[in-house]
Amino acid sequence: MSPLLLQGVASGIVTGCVYALIALSLVIVYKSSDVINFAGGEMVMLGGYLGMFALLWLGLPYLLIFPFGALMIFIVGALFDRVVLTRVVGRAIPGQSILVAMIIGTVGLSYVLKGAVRVIPYTEEVRRLPPFSSGAPIFVGPVVLQHQDIAIVVAAVAIMAALWAFFSFTLVGKALRATSQNPRAAALVGIPVRVMSMTAWGLAAALAGVAGILLAPKLLITPDMGVIVILALAAAIIGGFVSLPGCVAGGIVLGVVQNLIGLYVSSRAISLAPFLVIMIVLLLRPQGLFAGKAAAKKV
Amino acid sequence: MYGAPPLTRLAPLALLLIAGFVLPLLLPQYFLYLGNFLMMFAVLALGLDLLLGWAGQFAFAHIAFFGIGTYATALLNVRLGVPFVVGMPLAAMLAGLIGLAIGFPATRLRTVYLALATFAFAEAAQWVFNSWDKVTGGPDGLRIAAPNILGYRVGTDPTAFPVMAVILALVIAATMYLTTSKFGRAMCAIRESEHVASASGIDVRSTKAWAFAISAVYAGIAGGMYTLFQSFVNPDVFGFQQIVLLLSMIVVGGLGSIPGALIGVALLGLLPEVMRTTMRGLLIWQELVYGLILIGAVMFMPRGIWGFIAGRKGSR
């Protein structure tokens, strides 16, 4: 393998890890309330701004801005579910799909978050966070890795592992899974379904926010950086949209494919890659690349 | 209400036509521009409402067909010298054919998956408008020649206004016939339940694909309308923002009703203009206010404004 190819794969894995985190956030929302969260990208953006705010204004140490940002965005997500979505679902008209109303609600949230950030005068200037850790790049064989890239991968893997442990071993995690599989049965065994829905939204929002803080040193923070959500959507679709491990694999596949297209086809085609991937996968294998058979839809 | 609509229901269309010919004599150009813009969006919204409000298919590709219609009409005119009266129907048919070709595979997918596939199609189409610069002019855009309709020169707001009004009136009339026809009832049946619809002998797949194609034809017509009053087009016109605006219009106005779509278009289409003129210093708040309106609409008026009005009338 040529060094160029290896380098492309390595940096694809780094960006893929971030896509995977945002994709996880989208899929957790989808599994809990059947909607695509079009405000997911704005939650990433909000994470970036909150991280910068905590670091530069509050003077928090770098490690503490992650829990700070995560907590704040958790509240935003949970409140949105409690205040807006509960009401939309509660007023559903029999026979008419509430999906459209819920999705328009998330679009509304995306405008509210973007608009709220834009009215803060501080955001007129484009900024980026200092790197999480700096130092001479590390050479692994022919591949050059920045400290920041390694930090991103380590943080993303740690978060994914924590998420896996949370869903597998803790009571709340198991209750979340039960609610996602069958809300009525979950309610019958005494799981507070409404609290679970809030938790899922909060958790998803927090994941997107942390992804935003991880991205902030690599990308410029602007109110419009939420467009990155399209890449996360593509990653989630590659993984089948209902599987958490699928998201991680999908994110990394997408990151690597994008880099290889940039290397061997043209840099212009990079931005087309996610859309082509979405269409091809949905038309040929709507269950995702990794699922064995079509995922059964819950009733 | 089924069968052909009674003539009394067509009366408002006569008003629209009269307004189309009288208003250009009375109003300043800025208002005529706004009127043209709203009439174009009304055709777009009626087309999207057929698919989303009547057939219940959650698709995002509408804006791509709008783009195809605009570029096709403009290019037929500029490159091949095809006159508008021929070029616009051709462009609308092209949009419809592409819609049909996309519709058959896409409508196999449901709900979120359909939304994502069509969203990806719309983004890919925008990428094509941007990258195929030999034909579309790429990001630099394309100049549109002023169309000539049987000797009547269009291309400015006052001259385009009557033509736009005629097209909109025809489209509204067509929508009335379509939604009260057998096809319209088939779409409603699919929206309520695909299983029940297919058990009653409705060919679900082809009805969905045709709804997709007809909705694309509407978007193609709106694309032709764009060339009547604008002299320039670039790919930014067909971005994701526009489809969100359209969706918001029909959801806020009320899904599955012609007055609802028109109310939504008028309200959300004029909102930025009203904000620009009355709250000049507060322009920066526009996004925030817009988001709050969307959230408020889905929270408090689940049937949209028209559903709210019609519901009150019904309960009295």
Image (spheres, rainbow, N blue to C red):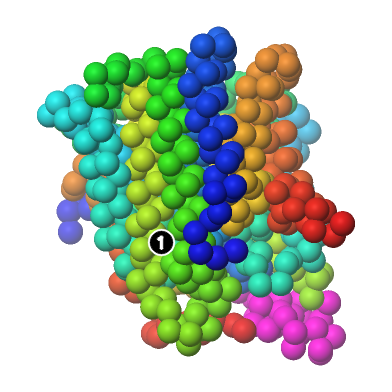
- At x 47%, y 56%, the residue is B177
Picture coordinates of residue B139 (x, y %)?
31, 27
Which is more toward the observer, A22 or B100?
B100
Picture coordinates of residue A24 (x, y %)?
56, 63
In the image, taking residue A20 as reference, residue B310 lies left or right, namely right
Q: Amino acid at mark 1?
A: Ala
In the image, taking residue B6 as reference, residue A276 lies left or right, namely left
- Number of callouts in the render? 1
Based on the picture, tell me whether residue A190 belongs to the magenta stretch: yes
- At x 24%, y 24%, the residue is B150
Farthest front residue in view: B7
Dot 1: few (<14), some (14–19), or many (≥20) neighbours within 10 Å?
Answer: many
Farthest right residue in view: B316
Is residue B178 something one can see in this rendering?
Answer: yes
Provide the residue span drawn in magenta. Answer: A163-192
Q: SS for tag 1?
A: helix
Q: Quadrant of residue B23?
A: top right
In the image, taking residue B139 as reference, residue B37 lies left or right, namely right
Which is more toward the observer, A47 or B220?
B220
- At x 35%, y 57%, the residue is B213
Is residue A214 something one can see in this rendering?
Answer: no
- At x 66%, y 29%, the residue is B271
